[in-house]
Amino acid sequence: MKLVIPEDYKSNEDLYRTQVLIKEIKDYFQINLANNLNLKRVSAPLFVSSKSGLNDNLNGVEKPVSFKLAEADNEQMEIVHSLAKWKRFALMEYKFKSHEGLYTDMNAIRASEEPDNTHSFYVDQWDWELIIDKKDRTEAYLKRVVDTIYRTMKSLDEYLCTLIPTRSKLLKDQIRFITSEELLQKYPNKTAKERERLAAKEYGAIFLSQIGTILSNGDKHDNRAPDYDDWLLNGDIIVYNPVLDDALELSSMGIRVDSFRLNEQLKQSGNLDRLKYDYHRMLLDDKLPQTIGGGIGQSRLCMFFLQKAHIGEVQVSYWPDDQRRTLANKGIQLL
């Protein structure tokens, strides 16, 4: 567990003022995101049945928090990791039309997480999903949606300057698009995380795409579950965070797999056994809509725009005692 405490760091706001600004950020951003992407707000589950296949495997190795329901024939349930699959199913159930979508508050427990400045056992994000046409399954369409989200972030950046007169804008005018292979070629002797940091620091904000594919060095930039994002049409919005002098991922998103890409990626990853799940069979039978979607970290967005050194300054969660003591000794107060 690596903890970074910036030299001479001091939070600009007290605890209650921070809470007030968190509400301003969340209210402003979600309303504008919904308007810009044509999204409707819905409720979402905290847990799903294990046998449904609706939970997300994230990087493919995280084990979900699970329990049995005694009053439901001991059905095995899982706390959601994210809602990528559930949202696609919900869009079908709600009978949404092309270029209509939904968003929701996603709250999750990721027990395998290693808590540090930007990671928590508790995850809170806006999960969104939008129905697209088959012809939209292109890199150009993906970039248009990324630009829309980035424009919404820039609008929030400007709005906060009206609330905090001493504040300066953080985001540059444009986000830089770069594939994981291009990033490897640019920094061939660096690790994946080092490459992200160098690119984010150079460009201010990047959309790093094609995550999950095998690169020319024989490795993946990062793992991605094979059954929701199309690895050729996905990516992360990553910004440079000057407080920590590091890259900060604000969003992971992508055009979702169709039946062909699902089969291909399950083969490549050795996960064809997942075809036994209801969700995956529906995908193979083309019963689910074509979609694009993603998650945008609520606490990470607040941490970045309020320039906090630790995510616990904007999120109530559990933090190990030694971490709390270390931060408190440096004057960093967690919620």
Image (tube, grey):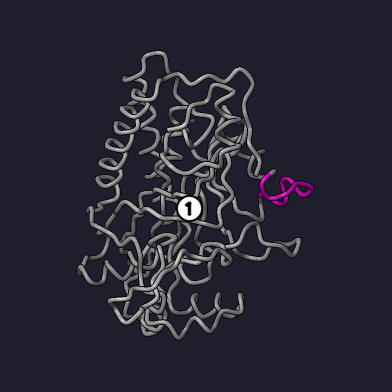
The amino acid marked with disc number 1 is Ser
Would you say residue 188 sits in the magenta stretch? yes
Q: Quadrant of the N terminus?
A: top right
Q: Quadrant of residue 282?
A: bottom left
Would you say residue 136 sits in the magenta stretch? no
Tell me where the magenta segment starts and ends, as one range. Answer: 183-193
Q: Is residue 220 above or below residue 70?
A: above
User: Could you say where residue 45 lies in the image, as x and y percent from the top left?
Assistant: 30, 62
Which residue does the image show at 55% across and 75% down from the upper left? 265
Which residue does the image show at 59% across and 49% down from the upper left? 114
Q: Quadrant of residue 73?
A: bottom left
Which residue does the image show at 44% across and 79% down from the upper left? 259
| 71 on left or right of 172 | left
- Numbered circles on residues, count: 1
Q: Is residue 110 above or below residue 156?
A: below
User: Could you say where residue 3 lies in the image, as x and y percent from the top left?
Assistant: 63, 36
Which residue does the image show at 38% across and 58% down from the upper left? 293
Q: Residues within 10 Å of mark 1 (few under 14, many from 20)?
A: many
User: Could you say where residue 285 lies in the image, as x and y percent from the top left?
Assistant: 37, 85
Q: Element type at marker 1? A: strand
Q: Quadrant of residue 169?
A: top left
Q: Quadrant of the C terminus?
A: top left
Q: Is residue 147 above or below residue 302?
A: below
Q: Nearer the viewer, residue 83 or 316?
A: 316
Q: Nearer the viewer, residue 168 or 216?
A: 168
Q: Is residue 198 above or below residue 47?
A: above
User: Could you say where residue 8 lies in the image, as x and y percent from the top left?
Assistant: 61, 17
Q: Nearer the viewer, residue 271 or 217?
A: 271
| 73 on left or right of 273 | left
Q: Residue furthest left?
A: 95
Q: Nearer the viewer, residue 260 or 55?
A: 55
Task: List the residue tagged with mark 1.
Answer: 252
